[in-house]
Image (cartoon, helix red, strand yellow):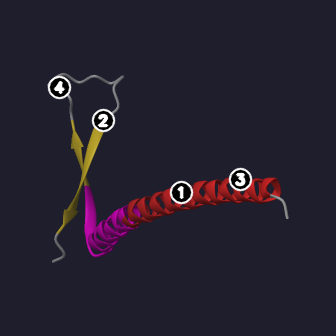
């Protein structure tokens, strides 16, 4: 084996090593992105769990109460063109 062939193989192996190092760096970068994405998704899941818990609480509150509509007028004048606004409140069961 000539010296030139050895030098060529060493150069080729250096190129292969550089390529592997780039792949490794990309992999580590991807791992960091995946970890961050997973952390962000965990936050989103916790937020949705909280929203669902609040929604279940409101749902239970409405299921267990009687609602009464209370008309509200926007002004002292009777304006027949404006629809009447309504506030809905729960009434205690007797």
The residue under label 1 is: 25
How far, Cα to Cα, is label 4 from label 1? 69 Å
State left or right for residue 19 relative to residue 55: right
Discs 3/4, front: 3
**How far from the left and from the top, in percent, is residue 17?**
64, 59
CA gap, disc 3 and disc 1: 21 Å
Instruction: Give the residue displayed 84% in from the left and 59% down from the top.
Output: 2
Image x and y of residue 7, in percent = 74, 55
Label whose residue precedes the other's in the sequence (2 or 3): 3
Mark 4 residue element: loop
Instruction: Look at the numbered disc 1 and give the secondary structure of its residue.
Output: helix
Q: Name the main secondary structure of what is drawn in magenta.
A: helix
Quarter of the image with the C terminus is bottom left
Residue at x 32%, y 71% (from the top left corner): 53
- The foreground one among 52 and 46 is 46
Q: Earlier in the sequence, mark 4 or mark 1?
A: 1
Q: Which residue is mark 4?
A: 75
Q: Is residue 20 left or right of residue 29?
A: right
Figure disc tally: 4
- Which disc number belongs to residue 84? 2
Using the image, tell me which numbered label, if any, was put on residue 11: 3
In whole angstroms, how far apart are the C-alphas of marks 3 and 4? 88 Å
Question: Tag 3's secondary structure?
Answer: helix
In which quarter of the view is residue 47 placed?
Answer: bottom left
Q: Please tell me which of labels 4 and 2 falls first in the chain.
A: 4
Q: On the rendered image, what quadrant is the N terminus found in?
A: bottom right
């Amino acid at each position: 084996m000539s010296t030139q062939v050895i030098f060529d193989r060493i150069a080729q192996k250096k190129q292969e090593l550089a390529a592997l190092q780039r792949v490794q760096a990309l992999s580590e970068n991807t791992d960091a992105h995946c970890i961050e994405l997973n952390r962000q998704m965990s936050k989103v899941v916790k937020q949705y769990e909280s929203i669902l818990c609040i929604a279940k609480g409101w749902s239970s509150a409405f299921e267990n109460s009687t609602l009464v509509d209370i008309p509200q007028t926007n002004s002292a004048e009777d304006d027949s063109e404006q629809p009447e606004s309504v506030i809905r409140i729960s009434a205690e069961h007797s």
